[in-house]
Amino acid sequence: MLDQIQGLHHVTSLASSAGQNNRFFTDLLGLRRVKKTVNFDAPDVYHLYYGDALGTPGSVMTYFPFPQAARGRHGSGEVGRTAFSVPEGTLEAWAERLAAGQAKGLARDTRFGEDRLLFDGPDGEGFALVATSADERAPWTGNGVGVALAIRGFHSVDMRLKDNGATGELLEFMGYRKLATEGNLTRFAIEDGGPAHVIDVETLDAPPADQGAGSVHHIAFAVENRARQMEVREALLDTGYQVTPVIDRDYFWAIYFRAPGGVLFEVATNEPGFDVDEDSAHLGEALKLPSQHAHLRGQLERRLEPIG
């Protein structure tokens, strides 16, 4: 069993509008945009990162907003909902805020003894706010959501799978432990991991998901540095997984592999961080380009949707 993985690093999804996406996460949810860059493989598309003050691993939601992208179809083999941690006693205030912001799909439920507020993103992606008194992470408050209410970072993700056996075995190999079951839900967690250490697996008989706007593209797990990442890579290769070489993503190094249930997994380093090319006081303000796309700046600044 691996001991290098600390929990979630980031979650990356697809969207249909950069402006709409930016407003939802900064104006409504109150997160900080910590990086405005472009997709390494499609530089005419933004890669937007939202999180806490510094984009701490375990807090960062990222998006590829493909203009006018068709909406995805939800089903099995995907991450169906991403959950954020908020202070206990704030769900009613969040419900009022989200309703005023015209968020769709508002509902309440309780899972494994935790109260949740469910809602949808602009492209129909599933989110939840989980009320907890145990999260001591400092939130970002620069977008007008006060410290008593603000999102602390990720709580968990929900994976929807036809069968959780092989993926459950993989999670346990990665250092997660099966904590509890509740109907068709199984909760896995890293006991000594960071706050974003929970994975819920829902088994359901449904057609495979079809990715599009509103779909999670991949989930990333955090490791401290490149040495620990290489240990994970070698262990996964030894177990039979097809793992990519290490890829430099400017703000972290990444490896990717497909989990048995169909979800794309990434293992990302906590280093070097989002302040490697911007002062921490001005994260996410300027358009930052990977070196291989620097020569396209003039063209991209004319073509990309202005989002401030």
Image (cartoon, rainbow, N blue to C red):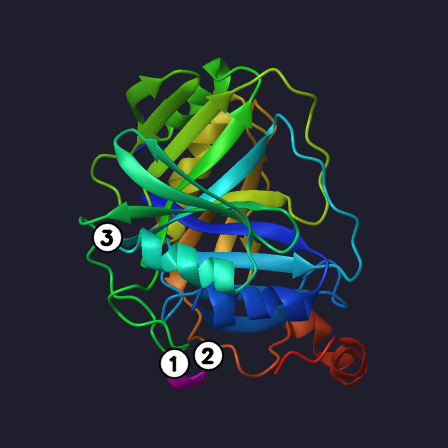
Dot 1: within a 10 Å radius of its alpha carbon, few (fewer than 14), some, or many (20 or more) residues? some
Which structural element holds mark 3? Answer: loop
The residue to which callout 3 is attached is 89
Front residue of this view, candidates 87 and 1? 87
Q: Give yes or no for contact between labels 3 and 1 (Cβ–Cβ under 8 Å).
A: no
**Amino acid type of the residue tagged 2 in the rendering:** Leu
Residue drawn at point x = 68 percent, y = 31 percent:
209
Residue 278 x/y as whole percent: 46, 82
> Of the residues tagged 3 and 1, which is closer to the observer?
3
Which secondary structure dominates the residues rendered in magenta?
Answer: helix
Drawn side of residue 131 relative to residue 267, left or right: left
The residue to which callout 2 is attached is 283
Residue drawn at point x = 75 percent, y = 80 percent:
295
Please, is residue 16 above or below residue 118 in the view? Answer: below
Label of residue 280 in the image: 1
Front residue of this view, candidates 8 and 205? 205
Q: CA distance from mark 2 to mark 3?
A: 31 Å
Can the viewer see residue 261 in this picture?
Answer: yes
Q: Which residues are magenta?
A: 278-282
Q: Quadrant of the C terminus?
A: bottom right
Which structural element holds mark 2? Answer: loop
**Amino acid type of the residue tagged 3 in the rendering:** Gly
